[in-house]
Image (cartoon, grey):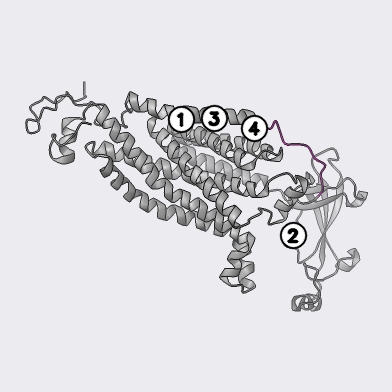
């Protein structure tokens, strides 16, 4: 056998530590039976409540409605550009005005006086649906941001009530192949680097999207409370993703508990400040269309649900990292008590806080960059920009999520330190060599 024999009682200064453990190397040992019962007493009722919530709120699919033909609420088909011919814009009754239709500005005057450019007349063939093979023409102005070329795959909208020649129109470019290729590269990178853990992470990602598309979105459309749906759905995603990726262990359970409490804090703060700031959640064309199609949906509740779900992914990262840090610190020095573990873990957490909060703020700022650019062009003051509902939503979303992230670090660190320290006192002793290396002697360890 290659494993070391238990140390005799006379080693390390004569202290009687002859009941050493054999797990000096490798992963952390399982926690004691008592702690497993305590953790299970918290997580089993919570998991049961989440399962009951899924069953009670399960929507059974999105409710049907009559399509409006506006925005995303249109019938679409795939198509391909066959040819693009150059024609005079006048011959197809297209003027050379500004793209926004305003003729009173200096931009419009410049556009009218500029040399006239030819238009493009694209012949487009429908490649899916009942009318596969049907062709129609699409006129592309020279100043249009989206230019078509032969052989290009596009998405077309179908309006059955329009005149025959106007039933189809190009709405977007078909990006499925580059998006699928990018997703394949991402999956390959995750599997190559993460191996089995990476495979499980991808499976958890698929499950998360399944919960989002099969439960959360249809349940909200059915008229269920968005906050309740988000809490149940986010909790289900959290349980499945964490245990699937990190295993069914006390370490993972501590991360789950830390994430759960942090999500509760985010929900309370979000509900308070969304109501206090009178944020309606109906700020753009998309939310306006949702409210028009389903007026019974609580848009402010939908905003709060988005805050909770959006914070979940980063919370998982923080709580798992902090829990693992405390566990590894305990393995490196089993004699450290809960205070020592907490102080060492929180030093790691402070670095994590700085990077995570900055990442979250920049992510929201990057998403709202065009909006911020418009305010900059208008030379609006910072107070005016922050007071507008569009920006105020992002500020509340960012700050509430960041508060939850910051709070999760000391909370999860303290919880992990208490669990792993209680496990040390309840499972006996560590190897005498490890104890002596940690504090310079084996007699410093106390029993509670």
Is 107 in front, or is 379? 379
Q: How many marks?
A: 4
Q: Are marks 3 and 1 in contact (CB under 8 Å)?
A: no
Occupied quadrant, residue 210 = top right
- State the mark number for residue 57: 4
User: Of marks 4 and 3, which one's residue comes earlier in the chain?
Assistant: 3
Q: Are marks 4 and 3 in contact (CB under 8 Å)?
A: no
- State the mark number for residue 391: none
**Residue 75, percent from left and from top:** 80, 44
Quadrant of the image containing the N terminus: top left
Q: Residue at x 72, y 55 (%)?
A: 285
- Using the numbered discs, state the Cα–Cα distance from disc 1 to disc 4 in whole angstroms: 21 Å
Q: Residue at x 48, y 55 (%)?
A: 359
User: Of marks 3 and 1, which one's residue comes earlier in the chain?
Assistant: 1
- Left or right of 237 in this view: 295: right
Q: Are marks 1 and 4 in contact (CB under 8 Å)?
A: no
**Would you say residue 14 is visible in this rendering?**
yes
Which residue is label 1 attached to? Answer: 43
**Which residues fall within the magenta stretch?**
57-69
Which residue is label 2 attached to? Answer: 147
């Amino acid at each position: 056998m290659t494993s070391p024999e238990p140390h005799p009682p006379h080693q390390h200064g004569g202290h009687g530590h002859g009941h050493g453990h054999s797990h000096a190397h490798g992963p952390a040992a399982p926690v004691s039976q008592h702690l497993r019962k305590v953790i299970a007493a918290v997580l089993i009722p919570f998991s049961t409540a989440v399962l009951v919530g899924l069953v009670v709120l399960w929507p059974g699919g999105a409710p049907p409605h009559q399509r409006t033909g506006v925005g995303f609420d249109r019938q679409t088909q795939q198509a391909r550009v066959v040819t693009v011919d150059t024609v005079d814009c006048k011959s197809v009754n297209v003027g050379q005005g500004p793209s926004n239709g305003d003729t009173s500005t200096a931009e419009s005057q410049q556009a009218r006086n500029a040399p006239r450019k030819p238009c493009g007349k694209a012949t487009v063939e429908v490649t899916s649906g009942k009318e596969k093979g049907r062709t129609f023409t699409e006129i592309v102005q020279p100043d249009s941001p989206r230019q078509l070329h032969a052989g290009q795959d596009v998405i077309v909208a179908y309006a059955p009530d329009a005149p025959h020649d106007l039933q189809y129109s190009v709405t977007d470019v078909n990006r499925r192949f580059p998006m699928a290729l990018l997703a394949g590269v991402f999956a390959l990178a995750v599997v190559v680097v993460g191996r089995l853990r990476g495979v499980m992470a991808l499976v958890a990602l698929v499950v998360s999207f399944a919960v989002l598309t099969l439960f959360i979105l249809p349940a909200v459309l059915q008229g269920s409370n968005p906050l309740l749906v988000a809490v149940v759905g986010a909790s289900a995603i959290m349980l499945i993703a964490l245990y699937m990726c990190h295993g069914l262990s006390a370490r993972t359970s501590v991360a789950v508990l830390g994430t759960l409490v942090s999500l509760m804090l985010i929900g309370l703060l979000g509900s308070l400040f969304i109501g206090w700031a009178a944020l309606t959640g109906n700020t753009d064309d998309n939310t306006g269309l949702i409210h028009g199609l389903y007026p019974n949906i609580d848009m402010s509740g939908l905003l709060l649900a988005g805050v909770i779900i959006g914070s979940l992914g980063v919370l998982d990262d923080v709580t798992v990292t902090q829990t693992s840090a405390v566990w590894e610190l305990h393995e490196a020095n089993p004699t450290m008590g809960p205070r020592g573990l907490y102080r060492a873990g929180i030093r790691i957490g402070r670095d994590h806080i700085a990077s995570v909060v900055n990442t979250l703020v920049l992510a929201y700022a990057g998403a709202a960059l065009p909006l911020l650019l418009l305010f900059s062009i208008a030379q609006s003051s910072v107070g005016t920009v922050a007071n507008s509902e569009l920006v105020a939503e992002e500020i509340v979303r960012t700050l509430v999520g960041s508060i939850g992230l910051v709070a999760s670090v000391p909370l999860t660190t303290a919880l992990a330190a208490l669990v792993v320290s209680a496990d040390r006192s309840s499972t006996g002793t560590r190897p005498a060599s490890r104890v002596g290396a940690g504090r310079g002697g084996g007699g410093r360890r106390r029993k509670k």
